[in-house]
Image (cartoon, helix red, strand yellow):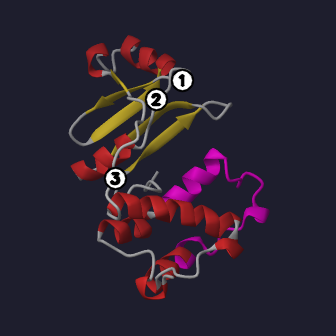
Amino acid sequence: MRSDLGVPGKITGYDCYNDAEQLEYIYRTSNDATILSISMDSWISSTDFPLYISQSNDSYIIANEDKKNELIDSGLIRSKSFAAVPSRSSEAWDTYGPLVCAQYAEALVYTFIFHREELPQNLSSEFLRLLTENYGDVEPGTNPSLRETSLATRALLGNKSESLNTFCQNGGEIFDNATEN
């Protein structure tokens, strides 16, 4: 991954999923501690599918239980460095900051790719320009693996999101307030 859709800044890494498209492990690295924290917080655990995290100053690994045990057994990561990924609770988020902007951007990218006629009319010209420059060439009908729920789609769209993430990180406005009803 060269960037992560929904994370408003520069982050790289890779994902590993099994054939059932369940997470085995992911690795992320960034020189920006805030961006790394936002990325880590985007992952949630459940009782049916617990996840574990091991982190350092500039990176983290999130793994399912089997992969966590493999990494510990191989000696690559100490068992004490893993902690359970918490379940998400309903948190009070800022009304519009970089994280909320990035989440809107992620939703709008999926809308643009899979439901082009449904884009809001009040998108700012800068956001619309970035959206069309980065995603205008993505056509779901030309690639059978390009489905809304596919992991290949998540990777493709995430890798194209760097300029949108920077836009959000720098305080960009997705919506043109002058045309809002």
Q: Nearer the viewer, mark 1 or mark 3?
A: 3
Measured from the top left, where is residue 178 in percent x and y?
43, 88
Q: Is residue 51 left or right of residue 111?
A: left
Q: Residue furthest top?
A: 73
Q: Which residues, given as a range, are shown in magenta? A: 132-160
Measured from the top left, where is residue 62 in percent x and y?
41, 31
Q: Is residue 17 above or below residue 94?
A: above
Q: Which mark is residue 49?
A: 1
Which residue type carries mark 1?
A: Phe
Q: Nearer the viewer, residue 34 or 151?
A: 34
Q: Looking at the rendering, which quadrant does residue 27 occupy? A: top left
Q: Is residue 133 magenta?
A: yes
* Residue at 51% from the left image edge and 60% from the top image edge: 106
Instruction: Decide which of tag 1 and tag 3 comes sooner along the chain.
Output: 1
| Disc 3, SS | loop
Instruction: Decide which of tag 2 and tag 3 comes sooner along the chain.
Output: 2
Q: Is residue 77 left or right of residue 153?
A: left
The residue where tag 2 is placed is: 45
Q: Is residue 172 left or right of residue 34?
A: right
Measured from the top left, where is residue 5 in percent x and y?
47, 56
Q: Is residue 114 left or right of residue 100?
A: right
Q: Nearer the viewer, mark 2 or mark 3?
A: 3
The residue where tag 3 is placed is: 93
Q: CA distance from mark 2 to mark 3?
A: 20 Å
Which residue type carries mark 2?
A: Ser
